[in-house]
């Protein structure tokens, strides 16, 4: 996968890759392991996410249309490319160029990136700063529901903690 | 945190906790401690890594951290512990919440 090849530079630019597959979990895991992917591979077996994004069966082939989105740290979309065939995707260089522009960095002066920066596991690059917006997440809860920080925007102040069981 | 939960709610705020521990361990905690605030599971560790608060002290755990986020979604105060056990005094949290308006 071409994205794996540019992954070190991509993370150095403050980006992260999240791949969404409509395969089942077994195939998604096989893809991640088989291709040695360092970034998260999510599976959307019930196609709910790809349907919500308007991609599922867009081309009438019973799968998700190939699509690549570059998402800014504030959660808005910088660029989107929805292909009409499986091989219609942005080039790795074009992705890196966009991320460099967003980060205000010059790729030519970055030097060797082959040591593979580990990066974070989500799209937003840096930890939130006091005074700035916080990144959203969506996680399952003990009650079997899901929760997002975004659920509380405009409603309540939030005390957010990283929790350990002995608290 | 559980002990001050009612006081936090009285200021019209919510507590959201994220744990990277597995379901069985965390569930045990819910029963034994009587946690009533929302506890989310992040066994992939993605969220603390995103916040740059994972395994900074070679514990393979999320580092103890507490954030106060206002209703506009902005981070207004944070306490970043230097280990995974660090806790913030309840009075401090309540004072911060009170200062941004309940």
Image (cartoon, coloured by chain):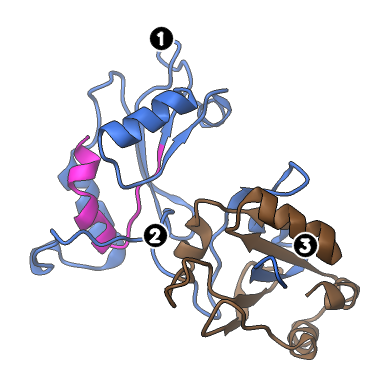
Chain colours: A blue, B brown
Q: Is residue B35 visible?
A: no
- Tell me residue B55's x, y (percent): 45, 70
> Gap between marks 3 and 2, in whole Å?
29 Å
Q: Secondary structure beneath disc 3? A: loop
| Segment colored magenta | A1-19
**Residue A18 lies in magenta, yes or no?**
yes
Query: Toward which corner of the image does residue A122 lie, by quadrant?
Result: bottom left
Camera-side residue of B23 and A41: B23
- Tell me residue A62's x, y (percent): 45, 11
Query: Toward which corner of the image does residue A164 lie, by quadrant?
Result: bottom right
Chain under numbered label 3: A
Residue A24: mark: none
Residue B77 placement, left or right of A145: left
Q: Residue beneath label 3, please?
A: A155
Residue A61: mark: 1
> Gap between marks 3 and 1, in whole Å?
42 Å
Determine whether label 2 and label 1 are within 8 Å by CB: no
> Gap between marks 2 and 1, in whole Å?
34 Å
Q: Residue beneath label 2, please?
A: A120
Q: Earlier in the sequence, mark 3 or mark 2?
A: 2
Residue B20 placement, left or right of A6: right
Query: Toward which corner of the image does residue A160 lie, by quadrant?
Result: bottom right
Confirm whether circles 3 and 2 share one chain: yes
Q: Is residue B31 visible?
A: yes
Which residue is pictured at 57% across the width and 57% down the height? A136
């Amino acid at each position: 996968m071409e994205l794996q090849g540019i992954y070190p530079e991509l993370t150095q630019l403050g980006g992260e890759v999240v791949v969404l597959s409509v395969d089942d979990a077994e195939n998604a895991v096989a893809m991640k392991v088989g291709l040695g992917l360092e970034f998260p591979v999510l599976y959307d077996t019930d196609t709910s996410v790809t349907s919500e994004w308007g991609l599922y069966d867009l081309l009438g082939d019973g799968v998700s249309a190939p699509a690549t989105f570059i998402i800014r740290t504030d959660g808005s979309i910088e660029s989107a490319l929805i292909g009409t065939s499986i091989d219609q995707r942005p080039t790795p260089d074009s992705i890196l160029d966009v991320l460099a522009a967003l980060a205000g960095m010059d790729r030519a002066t970055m030097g060797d990136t082959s040591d593979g920066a580990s990066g974070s596991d989500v799209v937003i690059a840096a930890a939130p700063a006091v005074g700035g917006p916080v990144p959203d997440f969506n996680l399952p809860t003990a009650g079997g529901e899901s929760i997002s920080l975004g659920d509380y925007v405009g409603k309540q102040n939030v005390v957010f903690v990283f929790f350990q069981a002995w608290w | 945190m559980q002990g001050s939960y009612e006081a936090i709610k009285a200021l019209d705020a919510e507590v959201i906790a994220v744990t990277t521990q597995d379901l069985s361990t965390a569930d045990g905690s819910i029963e034994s401690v009587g946690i009533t605030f929302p506890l989310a599971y992040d066994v992939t560790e993605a969220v603390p890594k995103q916040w740059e608060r994972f395994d900074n002290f070679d514990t393979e755990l999320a580092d103890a951290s507490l954030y106060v986020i206002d209703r506009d979604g902005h981070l207004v105060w944070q306490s970043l512990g230097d280990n995974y056990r660090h806790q913030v005094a309840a009075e401090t949290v309540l004072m911060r919440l009170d200062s941004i308006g309940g």
